[in-house]
Image: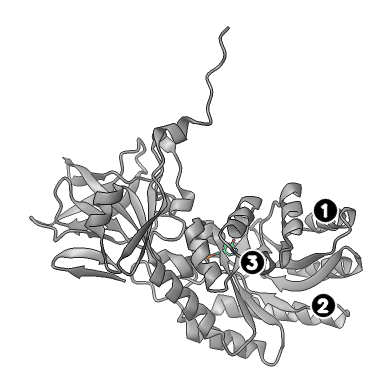
Amino acid sequence: MLHRHDGDLYFERVSLAEIADIYGTPTFVYSETAIREAYQSFAGAFRGHPHRICYAVKANSNLAVLQVLAELGAGFDIVSGGELARVIRAGGDPGRVVFSGVGKQDWEIEAALDAGIACFNIESASELQRLADIANRRGQQAPVSIRVNPDVDPGTHPYIATGLRENKFGVAMDTALEMYLQAGDLPSLNVVGIDCHIGSQITELAPFLDALDKVLALLDQVEAAGISISHVDLGGGIGVRYRDEVPVDIDAFASAVTQVMGNRSQTLMFEPGRYIVANAGLLLGRVITLKSNEDRHFAVIDAAMNDLIRPALYQAWQDVVPVGPGEGKAMTWDIVGPVCETGDFLARDRELSLREGDLLAILSSGAYGAVMSSNYNTRMRAAEVMVSGEQHHCIRRRESLDDLLALESLLSRD
Ligand code: LLP
């Protein structure tokens, strides 16, 4: 999707320099084709087994992104009432929504019951009881799955590993059976599934298969107790290539998973976020100032940690490429933002030919980019643009200072 033509960088058939001229910088740019292709490769890999891909909305919740996925027939994995509202606004089918998260509030549960979602992924005994009470009061039956914690090490950054015993997520394997029996006895609950999510940016197959083994062992016990389960949700977490990682090949992943499923009839569900959008997006920024201190060279650009926090928060490596041909002598640069924090860097030690005013593209910014942005330092949040062939659409205008101040009030002094 990203290619160079006459020295200039293009995303699909749109010049990124032109995007910067029209929309300014910093701006997130997404490729509709890349999103479609990623979704279709995932769904296509599972065509031999009943499946549903529930895109993890948290990765990129822009309405237009959700719209593209809704049009492809995707389901959605949400973690809040806000995300549910986005899915509905974007034309997503609530009947294909699963609701994850450790702290679902009453209003969110009620909104999800109103919408008729497919499943509540339950994370604790207390949440199970709360959902049963709310559904009972409303004379409804709530579809449930219990998120088990299979205690496998996904071999990823500690902040994004979720399936270890010490994490706050899910229910320990040895108490899950008891919870299923409890759920089976509550008339306002309808047990439909079993789920887990072991972490994010996982590049190995083994942790997924270990988790699946454990989940299926529990499924057998639950079914032996007379409770039937219609879906197995393995969560998200499938890694992508940011630098030189060799992620799991999706076809190999699908064939290993379906082989372990054997002739079980349950629908396989997944909640991929990063896999669908990470490499379908980039962040465009412009060099404001070049400066050198002692032995380091800094390129201060107009994008910062408030726009893209992954490098600062997880020491994540994302590629930085010049949008123009990049003239002059190459040097080793730290690409930093204007925010007043030493941790405000987007990339370190990059060999680039840079001049003030140059445009840079920070690649792989489609997942956990715009959604994690903030107004720190009273910076307006970036614009978001979707390219599609030779077209470009503004899918979120840049915030204005008025937008930013609109919710605040001065103290009254009369
Ligand atoms: N399902 C559940 C229950 C999750 O908690 C997550 C991600 C996903 C699915 C989607 O995972 P994915 O397929 O995108 O790996 N901000 C971090 C990642 C946090 C992931 C949180 N949960 C980052 O930028 O690396």
Report the number of discs. Answer: 3
Q: Residue furthest bottom?
A: 263
Asked whether disc 3 touches disc 1, contact meaning CB atoms under 8 Å apart, the reply is: no
How much space separates mark 2 and mark 1, taking CA atoms? Answer: 22 Å
Residue sitting at 44 percent across and 52 percent down?
Answer: 370
Mark 3 or mark 1: which comes first in sequence?
3
Q: Amino acid at mark 3?
A: Asp
Residue 37: which quarter of the image?
bottom left
Judged from the image, the secondary structure of the residue bearing numbered disc 2 is helix
Mark 2 or mark 3: which comes first in sequence?
3
Q: Which mark is residue 130?
A: 1
Residue sitting at 62 percent across and 87 percent down?
Answer: 49
380, above or below 227, in the image: above
Q: Which mark is residue 41?
A: none
Q: Where's residue 56, x and y in %? A: 56, 64
Ligand 1, by image quadrant, is bottom right
The crowd level at tag 2 (other Cα within 10 Å; few <14, some 14-19, many 20+) is many
81, above or below 73, in the image: above
Mark 2 or mark 1: which comes first in sequence?
1
Residue 231: which quarter of the image?
bottom right
Residue 89: which quarter of the image?
bottom right
Judged from the image, the secondary structure of the residue bearing numbered disc 1 is helix
In front of the other: 369 or 311: 369
In front of the other: 295 or 97: 97
The crowd level at tag 3 (other Cα within 10 Å; few <14, some 14-19, many 20+) is some
Q: Amino acid at mark 2?
A: Val
Q: Nearest to the eye among marks 2 and 3: give it.
A: 3
Q: Is residue 206 left or right of residue 260?
A: left
In front of the other: 25 or 341: 25
Residue sitting at 66 percent across and 56 percent down?
Answer: 168
Instruction: From the image, tell me which residue sits under label 3.
Output: 93
Q: Amino acid at mark 1?
A: Arg
